[in-house]
Amino acid sequence: MISATKNSSKFLTKDFLLKSEFAKILYHDYASKLPIIDYHCHLSPHDIATNRKFNNTSEVWLAGDHYKWRAMRTLGIDERFITGAATDEEKFTKWAEAVPYTLRNPLYHWTHLELQRYFDITDLLGPDNAKSVYDETTAKLQSPAYHTQGLLKKMNVEIVCSTDDPIDSLEYHKIAESSSPDTKLFPAFRPDKVYAVENPAAFKAYISQLSEVSSIEIKNYNDLLAALQNRIDHFHNHGGTLSDHGLEQLYYFELGSYDISTLFTNVLSGKILSVEETQYFKFYTLYELCKMYHTKGWTQQFHLGALRNTNERMLSKLGPDTGFDSIGDFSQARALASFLNLLDGTDQLAKTILYNLNPTANEVMATMIGNFNDGSIRGKIQFGSAWWFLDQKDGMEKQINALSNMGLLSCFIGMLTDSRSFLSFPRHEYFRRILCNLIGEDVANGELPADEAWLGKIVSDISYYNAKNYFNF
């Protein structure tokens, strides 16, 4: 078994990823100390509001992290030590054994950044020091400084936006208003189940829940829209200014291609819609939602391109979001342009962030945003930060370069974690270092002037100020 406990003097130093002197200046003097606005993540509002104390390191670091789970399965580690009945310490030990083998995967960088930034552990994690690292980090987690709110404060997290279903009461967001003084928590409206009509029984059960929380008896499609407006109002009253949608692709049809009321009635009666009927229902319902967002002055987010739940055997065993998704190769451009154009045609296109999962579509997204930036808002339509499988050094560089070449990097609202872990915030540092290094290299190559004040401002804007000014928190 490989031993990996001693850190090289050249690995993960204060100048990690910064290859030029100008890059070091940009990062250390302009980016590193800025607060974090994490405008999209999957952190638990309950855990933030109640300032959860984690019993051990596996609870905060391994639970729910399907990035780590995929790596462990690849190494032949039994599911018992991943999502199964093994003890938390046994699971941590297996992860520690896996870490040396993750070299050149972003997990290797993230793991050691997180150990350093949160726990001041600079040794490399491996089987030889698994127990000592587990014991030391678990002991620190018992201190209030390492409860959820302390972990957020440690990383200078100013704002967190959770991802919440329309039926959520948002009670913990309300509690967090007074219980979390250093980090503000806001909800983001994620209505994916509202148009998930592929399974009529599950859809009907969800509509029943939506009817109950909105106090609107949903008997027809207009009732559904009224209930959704009710929930959007509810989110707005709790500080919500964002929606989010996880979609393979956006769909577009001529309005009236199908009778939406009939489709809704058919689904509630248990009828399985055809592929085109299903797509039309998604298209039209999203279209109606987007008009509501615009009225509220919200920002809408579209996460596009994930091929989800590909392994049916494991889906039935473990459920969704357990590490069996991949990049999809869906056609994006034409329907996306037509959908945005439909809203823009009546001046009802809200601020929009497009997240792309397939790197072959980076330039598609980078050019698409320019079609609908109309001068009304700075950076109204955004090409969102490199997402999911692209959330690594090469993926971030390609997204930044595509945006730079096809749009204006200076208007970019920057990084987010998209994470379920309270230990993931060094990803913002990772992004900022990569950004500063790219600009620093341009200066070193004579492709940008060595104007420290101006380039420092651009870096500061992308790291923090653009997001702060873009969202109406």
Image (spheres, rainbow, N blue to C red):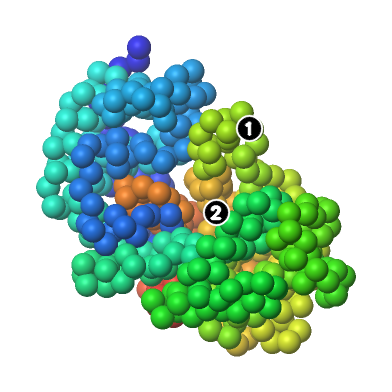
Q: Amino acid at mark 1?
A: Asn
For label 1, count other residues whose C-alpha is less than 10 Å away and answer few (under 14), some (14-19) or many (20+).
few
Residue drawn at x 22%, y 37% is: 56
For label 2, count other residues whose C-alpha is less than 10 Å away and answer few (under 14), some (14-19) or many (20+).
many
Vertical placement of residue 117 versus 91, above or below? below
Label disc, if present, on residue 386 of the rendered structure: 2
Residue 102 horizontal side relative to residue 225, left or right: left
Where residue 236 sits, quadrant-wise, is bottom left
Q: Position of residue 402 (x, y in %)?
A: 63, 58
Residue 380 horizontal side relative to residue 422, left or right: right
Residue drawn at x 49%, y 80% is: 233
Q: Position of residue 284 (x, y in %)?
A: 74, 70
Residue 181 horizontal side relative to residue 25, left or right: left
Vertical placement of residue 19 versus 224, above or below? above
Residue drawn at x 54%, y 66% is: 210
Q: Is residue 63 visible?
A: yes
Element type where label 1 sits in the image: loop
Q: Position of residue 462 (x, y in %)?
A: 45, 67
Which mark sits nearer the N-terminus, 2 or 1?
1
Quadrant (top left/top right/bottom left/bottom right) for the N terminus = top left
Q: Residue furthest top?
A: 1
Quadrant (top left/top right/bottom left/bottom right) for the C terminus = bottom left
Element type where label 2 sits in the image: loop
Label disc, if present, on residue 311 of the rendered structure: 1
Q: Nearer the viewer, residue 153 or 269?
A: 269
Q: Is residue 104 visible?
A: no
Residue 233 horizontal side relative to residue 376, left or right: left
CA separation in Å, label 2 and label 1: 25 Å
Q: Nearer the viewer, residue 96 or 273?
A: 273
Q: Amino acid at mark 2?
A: Ala
Label disc, if present, on residue 73 of the rendered structure: none
Q: Position of residue 203 (x, y in %)?
A: 64, 56
